[in-house]
Image (cartoon, rainbow, N blue to C red):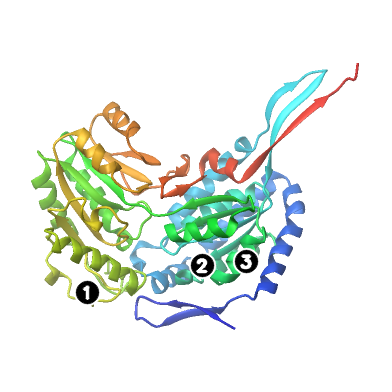
Amino acid sequence: MSMIKCISPVNGEVYAERPAMPLELAKQAVAHARQAQKSWARRPLDERVNLVLAGVARLNEMVDEVVPELAWQMGRPVRYGGEFKGFNERSNYVASIAADALQPILVEDSDRFGRRIEREPHGVVFVIAPWNYPYMTAINTVAPALMAGNTVIIKHASQTILVGERMVRAFVEAGVPADVFQNVFFDHETTAALIAAKSFDFINFTGSVEGGRSIERAAAGTFTGLGLELGGKDPGYVMEDADLDAAVDTLMDGATFNSGQCCCGIERIYVHESLYDAFVEKSVAWVSNYKLGNPLDPETTLGPMAHKRFAATVREQIADAISKGAKALVDPKLFPQDDGGAYLAPQVLVDVDHSMAFMREETFGPAVGIMKVKSDSQAIELMNDCQYGLTVSLWTQDADRASRIGRDLETGTVFMNRADYLDPALCWTGVKETGRGGSLSVIGFQNLTRPKSYHLKKVTA
């Protein structure tokens, strides 16, 4: 029997492992979910919503276990306290809009006809969740899917192998039936076989572009609905009227928090020439204040990357950029904890351009490139010069200008004077190789259900 293992970035040792579920047992899990779905969907909406919120509350009670587990599994410092703020915000918001989002669209209710469009759950929803924000990314789909009447099977990345297990434990202890929300440990072959067999009615995947392609290939011909949140290379643009200190603080945090391992983290920044020198100087000083170290130490502000192979990718991109003329401005002597493995010092590069992979390919680490621009048109061209499109962060005092620029940007979300945030009232979506579909907001509920039309003729004459 093959084992799925989490290698901790803290010490490079196996932190947790679970046996991969054989295909026949995997099929049984899906069958149990399918059998449970109709009765779950027949429960009143407010009952489903309240059970989900009870599961969220139960998970919050596990904070003392969850936070150090995350540090051991993927390296986020314990000082940041886990993901409960965003986890709770998203759960509470989708609960508050569930009734309106799932309300039938009434076309006619007369003595002659009843015409309406109702929302029906897809059935069995398969959530394949990532390791970088394993609780928040999962709840984006889990909460509205369960509220809408679907059953959910969750499979987490091996790097955060314990997260799905803990989520399901919390929800089941709170009263969600065991077959309604299940955690599984599948290897790639079993996952592909189940998808190809049309075992699921909707699949939500957050991860790499290549992972998304693998899921599309497995699902080919099944007509299974897919939601795919894939890569990103999110830019910031600092205009001449920006609040400089606020821009530095937010964009540098967006580039380096969680060791840069954020779906919508800032990976490249374009600064108007009038602010460029000051922005660079302040950014280097900001990043240099990090304390890199063991994430279990409360004094640590920057932990290791989740795996040494992820850190190796960042180092390779930085080295390639430097070989092509880029300059690294953060003094490595400030970070003696950088061990050449998972522990990686933050870095700011200048003299970069789009001939470098560092400015066009996903880096997903605590490193950012900064370029000087002369105009909005130049910044727009550079921001669009990428195969990804998740978010952009615009810095200006002029909301109309930000809106005009935003209409020319190939992206899922346009931020003004903020970055690296997911607003649960807005649809979380992307374009190009960032994926397709959308989660949260009213649209998230629409994607987790299907429309059914009723045309009822009340008289026969």
Q: Which residue is mark 2?
A: 163
Who is closer to the viewer here, 263 or 397? 263
- The secondary structure type at the circle numbered 1 is loop
- Residue 455 found in image quarter: top right
Whole-angstrom CA distance, mark 3 to mark 1, is 41 Å
Q: In the rendered structure, which disc, 3 or 1, sits on the residue that comes first in sequence?
A: 3
Q: CA distance from mark 1 to mark 2?
A: 28 Å
Q: Amino acid at mark 3?
A: Ala
Of labels 1 and 2, earlier in sequence is 2
Labels 1, 2: front one: 1
The residue under the point 32% across, 60% down is: 364
State the quadrant of the C terminus: top right
How far apart are labels 3 and 2 at the CA level? 24 Å
- The quarter of the displayed image where residue 347 is located: bottom left
Position of residue 78 in the picture relative to residue 190 (left or right): left
For mark 3, what is the residue? 193
Other residues around mark 2 within 10 Å, as few (<14) / some (14–19) / many (≥20): many
Camera-near label (3 vs 2) is 3
To which residue does mark 1 refer?
A: 338
Q: Are marks 1 and 2 in contact (CB under 8 Å)?
A: no
